[in-house]
Image (cartoon, helix red, strand yellow):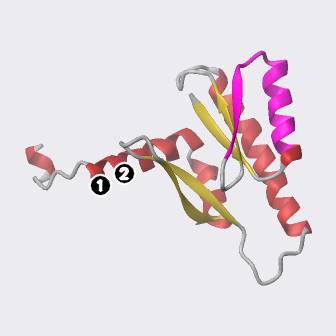
Amino acid sequence: MLEYIFFDDKLQYQFCDYLRNKQIGFSLADDSMGQLVNVQLPDDDPQCEQLDEVYDGLMEQQEILLQEEDCEGTQAVTAITIHLKDGATVYANIEAELMNRLLAVISPEEISNLVDAIASAIENRDTKPLCKR
């Protein structure tokens, strides 16, 4: 399952309309950071890449909306979702500019996989040298 977070209702509705038109199942959830859209596709589904492109385009619109609000003196912040082994989900705040740079070269799924690997390494410490694992 894929998870997408939105900070603007209109952009979330656009994404949901896109999913409905493509007959892709999804569910909605509220989160302290924004609204979540959980897409019910396996990670290796060929449609995932297209969904990521649609999402990236909507996040560009989100950035424009933030700039238009003229939030002088504040920084735009996005977050990376971290899934812990106890089932909890936490978010690491990331500056929007850094997130945009990451998304320019790495898909949201790849970022999630990287962060999950880091969280797993922290929660399941293995202090042996890498060559002896």
Residue shown at 65%/32% (left/top)?
A: 38
Residue 7, image x, y percentages: 77, 53
As displayed, is residue 105 above or below residue 71? above
- Res 50 quadrant in image: top right
Q: Report the Cα–Cα distance between label 1 and label 2.
A: 5 Å
Asked if the magenta segment contains residue 94, the reply would be no
Q: Is residue 107 visible?
A: no
Q: Crowding near pointer 2: few (<14 within 10 Å), some, many (20+)?
A: some
Q: Is residue 56 visible?
A: yes
On the rendered structure, is 56 left or right of 122? right
The kind of secondary structure element at disc 1 is: helix
Pointer 2: what residue? 119
The kind of secondary structure element at disc 2 is: helix
Q: Which mark is residue 122?
A: 1
Residue 114, image x, y percentages: 43, 47
Q: How many marks?
A: 2
On the rendered structure, is 85 left or right of 19? left
Residue 94, image x, y percentages: 58, 64
Please state which of residues 65 and 26 is positioned toward the viewer in this rendering. 26
- Res 39 quadrant in image: top right
As displayed, is residue 67 above or below residue 17? below
Please state which of residues 67 and 29 is positioned toward the viewer in this rendering. 29
Magenta region, residue range:
11-30
User: Mark 2 and mark 1 in contact (Cβ < 8 Å)?
Assistant: yes
What's the amino acid at mark 1?
Answer: Ile
Residue shown at 90%/69% (left/top)?
A: 69
On the rendered structure, is 111 left or right of 121? right
As displayed, is residue 74 above or below residue 131? below
On the rendered structure, is 58 left or right of 2? right
Q: Which mark is residue 78?
A: none
Asked if the magenta segment contains residue 25, the reply would be yes
